[in-house]
């Protein structure tokens, strides 16, 4: 009996020495996060959540959300920011979590969902009103609703800054012009003349490449027709001619979307710099 | 005098430092950042590891084909890695003669009729066939 009690006491005391409490775990996890050991940090935070969700829940949710945002897991990040929002006590903490969640959604290009989160913000102060407007403007821009986005950004800039208002209007004029390009038009143009669709999209390198390759194939086809017969040319070169001709017009719409997306994003970044300079 | 010059220098260097962007602007900037396209030499890192001039020439031909011809084509090859990638890998792995024969063998099999003999890659839905002798 005595021996058993002694053993139990010994094990309990050993356990007390070796184990970390939740506070220490959070500290270690933060340290690991700062060092860039994201896997270890994530495991530690999840361990704390498992054992002491009540006390450290909100801290761990926030840190896990930040961690996922940093590592590019934007879906998980939005999930943890949502939990942070649900567990936050004050209005400002709730607002901050909503903004962060909207950011994670914007990073996934989920503009409508991000707008839904932003609209939940309680904008009682001027600072929150401006932040809300900034995100709403970004959401509208992402949804390609440039009219609404322009109105919002003009509100952010204010009535007095005339030069900046003009600059914002210029950016939106440019955005509308970029958005006017249609993938279907690019496809039709490429069908009429190989490379024309790529030229319309604004990708000059691909336009030249497509035109050159198709010209070469056409030359090969004509040469074979003149040297041998039309039947021979169709049999030997027809599939190659069609392959690159079809490839050109099938790629043109995708290329148009790609170039449009790139130009719109560049324009938005430039717009942000203008607004920020205020 | 020295102190004045020093303080002026410190102040001027301070203004030259890039201003820290507020977190909201940084986040939005990141959200509207263009995704970087991988360069061909990064995608096919094997094309950079050449042991002799012949391999260098073949790698060059492969990259030219990928840039000029394959970029204008539809997604036609039924295998993963594609026939051109297979050719490059085979030559690198087995040498010019064996690799060349292996590549010609692959080209004869790339016809859409041999699906049942291979496993399917769940990501690309192409038939998996790596170079082996």
Image (tube, helix red, strand yellow):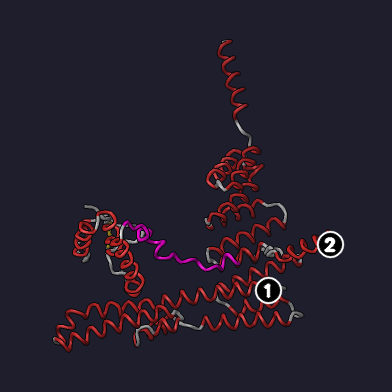
Percent across and percent down for residue A76 are: 53, 54
Q: Residue at x 27, y 55 (%)?
A: B130
- The answer to if B43 sits in the magenta stretch is yes
Discs 2 and 1 share one subunit: no
Picture quadrant of residue A130: bottom right
Q: What are the residue bounds of the magenta stretch?
A: B29-51
Q: Closer to the camera: disc 2 or disc 1?
A: 2
Task: Work out whether residue A129 can be spotted.
Answer: yes
Tell me the residue at 24%/53% (across/down): B132
What is the quadrant of residue B105 in the picture? bottom left
Q: Which residue corresponds to mark 2?
A: B4
Q: Residue at x 26, y 55 (%)?
A: B131
For the residue carrying disc 2, how many other residues have a C-alpha within 10 Å: few (<14), some (14-19), or many (20+)? few
Callout 2 secondary element: helix
Q: Position of residue A112 (x, y in %)?
A: 56, 68
Verify whether residue A220 appears in magenta: no
Q: Is residue A207 left or right of residue A160?
A: left
Label 2–label 1 contact, CB within 8 A: no
Q: Along the horizontal axis of the image, is A84 left or right of B120?
A: right
Residue at mark 1: A275
Up the image or down, A140 lies above or below A103; here it is below
Nearest the camera: A129 or A44? A44
Residue at the outermost front position: B1
In the rendering, at what x and y percent does residue B1 appear?
A: 86, 61
Q: Is residue B131 left or right of residue B47?
A: left
Measured in 3D between alpha carbons, the distance from the residue under mark 2 to the one under mark 1, in whole angstroms, is 36 Å
Chain to which mark 2 belongs: B
**Is residue B68 placed above or below B23 in the rendered structure?**
below
> Are there few (<14), some (14-19), or many (20+) residues within 10 Å of tag 1?
some
What residue is at 52 percent from the left and 68 percent from the top? B34
């Amino acid at each position: 009996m005595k021996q058993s009690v002694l053993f139990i006491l010994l094990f309990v005391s050993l356990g007390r020495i070796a184990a970390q409490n939740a506070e220490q775990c959070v500290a270690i996890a933060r340290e690991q996060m700062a060092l860039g050991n994201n896997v270890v940090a994530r495991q530690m935070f999840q361990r704390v959540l498992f054992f002491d969700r009540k006390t450290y829940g909100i801290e761990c949710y926030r840190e896990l959300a930040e961690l996922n945002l940093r590592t590019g897991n934007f879906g998980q990040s939005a999930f943890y920011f949502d939990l942070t929002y649900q567990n936050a006590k004050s209005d400002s903490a709730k607002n901050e979590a909503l903004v962060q969640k909207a950011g994670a959604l914007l990073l996934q290009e989920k503009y409508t969902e991000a707008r839904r989160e932003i609209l939940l913000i309680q904008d009682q102060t001027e600072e929150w009103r401006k932040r809300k407007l900034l995100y709403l403007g970004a959401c509208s821009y992402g949804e390609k609703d440039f009219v609404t986005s322009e109105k919002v950004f003009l509100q952010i800039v204010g009535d007095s800054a005339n030069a900046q208002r003009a600059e914002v209007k210029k950016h939106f004029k440019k955005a509308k012009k970029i958005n006017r390009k249609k993938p279907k038009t690019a496809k039709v143009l490429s069908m009429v003349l190989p490379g024309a669709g790529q030229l319309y999209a604004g990708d000059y390198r691909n336009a030249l490449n497509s035109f050159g390759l198709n010209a070469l194939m056409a030359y090969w086809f004509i040469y074979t027709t003149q040297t041998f017969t039309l039947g021979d040319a169709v049999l030997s070169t027809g599939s190659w001619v069609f392959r690159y001709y079809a490839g050109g017009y099938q790629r043109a719409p995708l290329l148009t979307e790609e170039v449009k997306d790139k130009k719109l994003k560049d324009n938005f970044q430039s717009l942000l710099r203008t607004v920020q300079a205020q | 005098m020295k102190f004045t010059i020093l303080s002026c220098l410190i102040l001027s260097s301070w203004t030259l430092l890039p201003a820290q962007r507020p977190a909201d602007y940084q986040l939005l900037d990141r959200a509207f950042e263009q995704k970087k396209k991988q360069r061909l030499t990064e995608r096919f890192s094997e094309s950079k590891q050449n042991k002799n001039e012949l391999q260098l020439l073949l790698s060059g031909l492969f990259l030219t084909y990928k840039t000029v011809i394959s970029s204008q084509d539809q997604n036609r090859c039924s295998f993963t890695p594609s026939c051109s990638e297979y050719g490059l890998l085979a030559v690198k792995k087995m040498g010019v003669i064996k690799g060349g024969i292996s590549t010609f063998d692959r080209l004869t099999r790339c016809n859409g009729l041999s699906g049942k003999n291979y496993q399917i890659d769940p990501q690309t839905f192409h038939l998996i066939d790596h170079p082996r002798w």
